[in-house]
Amino acid sequence: GAKHESTMATASSHPSTTATTIEDGGPATGVVGDDDRHSSPSSPRSPSSMGGAVRSSGWRSLTPYPLVERWNQVLELGPSDRHRRGVLANGMKYFVQRTFKPRERAALALAVDVGSIAEDLDERGVAHLVEHLAFRATESNDNFAIVRFLESIGAEFGACQNAYTSMDETVYELLIPIDKPEVMTQALKVMSEFATKVRISDADVNDERGAVLEEMRMGRDARGRASEAYWKLLMEGSLYAERLPIGMESVVREGDPEVFRRFYKKWYRPERMAVVVAGDFEDLDAVVVEIEAAFSGCKPAPGQPPVGAAQQVPRPLIAPHAEPRMVCTVDKEHTKTSVTVTFKYEANKVSTPGGFFRKTVEDAFKLALDNRLYKIMRRTDPPFFSAA
């Protein structure tokens, strides 16, 4: 996989000035020391080469961390008294975390390991519309009964109940009060219905098409058109360039409802899911028991392979390129000129001390670059209106 970070500047004169200003931050890669240019990003270095913070007097009272020895050691998610994790018999993972703020509140998420990248040509837009259908109806909840229940406990739609579909995942989220134990039980039951019991009738699909088409229309402004052109250039040579979650209008407008049902049955399986619960809990083990009660009954749809035999979601590689790519969009609806510069580099997993260190260096670099751009922006006659 790969990740990308963007630097955006809005020009007040002409693009070349903005490009020069952005490039002015380039040497900031030296913030971790000149010798960093010659070291492998995946290998540890001695503390003396990791910058002045280790040697400064402000850190003398801290016990030195054996970073070199533990560079590739996978870290625990957190203290054992504050989290629980496990796998149910049906393959579904769960993660429970105790937090102290906000009081008497809990955040719930159901993460499904499938997004628009798994869509076939006749399914482009199906993953997103299926996500919409989950809040419409399930086997045990008639039209918008879930929304009404959540609003009755103060979980306003949008702020406290929502979902999103990306290319790689679909995630359902709830923020609920837990001062009454039965609310937690009901909310987990709702999540379990999202997992394997969403109702996808012909009428449901046809009724939801309009909402997605409107979302598609709203995203087709000047900013949306420029973003789509930018993304396709960024991912050129990879299937990611052709699988935007919003999909194809023809599929959303006229797609056979059976195609939506087929997608849901194929990919929504317990071993492709994780339940994440974080909240002001007194008893984490009691939360685990509730999760087991709500989700242990989830199973693959009839006719689908048994647990453990699910088809893998395609994860296409992002093709490397030696030469820079450029795209320019001109649109009469644009209200300002903007320049985006993106640098691609290998994704960094923050699961080990080494990964956390690399992420800290990356964040420090971006903060330094941000600060430099901000200082330029605050000049009397800056070359751009804003930059970040």
Image: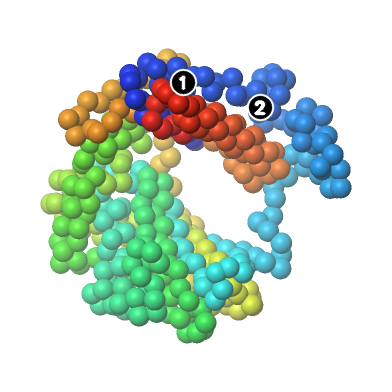
- Give the percent coordinates (x, y) of residue 152: 35, 80
Colour pattern: rainbow
- The Cα atoms of the two marked residues, 1 and 2, are separated by 19 Å
Q: Residue at x 70, y 19 (%)?
A: 34
Report the front residue among 128 and 104: 104
Q: Given the image, on which type of amino acid does mark 1 rest?
A: Thr
**Residue extending furthest front?**
380
Q: Earlier in the sequence, mark 1 or mark 2?
A: 1
Residue 322 x, y percent position in the rendering? 45, 16
**Are the residues at dot 1 and dot 2 in contact (C-beta closer than 8 Å)?**
no
Q: Which residue is mark 2?
A: 31
- The residue shown at (71%, 65%) is 80
Number of on-image labels: 2
Q: What residue appears at the point 30 percent right and 41 percent down from the top-left corner? A: 244
Q: Around disc 1, counting alpha carbons within 10 Å, would you say few (fewer than 14), some (14 to 19), or many (20 or more)?
A: some
101 left or right of 342?
right
User: Could one spot residue 325 in this view of the protein?
Assistant: yes
**Of the numbered discs in the image, which one, if any, rests on residue 60?**
none
Residue in the foreground of this view, choosing between 2 and 362: 362
Where does the image place residue 108, in percent across and percent down from the top left?
A: 48, 67
Residue at disc 2, secondary structure = helix
What residue is disc 1 on? 21
Q: For residue 66, what is the image quadrant?
A: top right
Question: Callout 2: 10 Å neighbours few (<14), some, many (20+)?
Answer: some
Of marks 1 and 2, the one in the foreground: 1
Q: Quadrant of residue 187?
A: bottom left
Q: Residue at x 30, y 67 (%)?
A: 135
Question: Horizontal placement of 125 versus 59: left or right?
Answer: left
Name the secondary structure under disc 1. Answer: helix
139 over 159 or under it: above or below: below
Name the spot of residue 137 as percent of width and height, x first: 27, 71
117 shown above or below 362: below
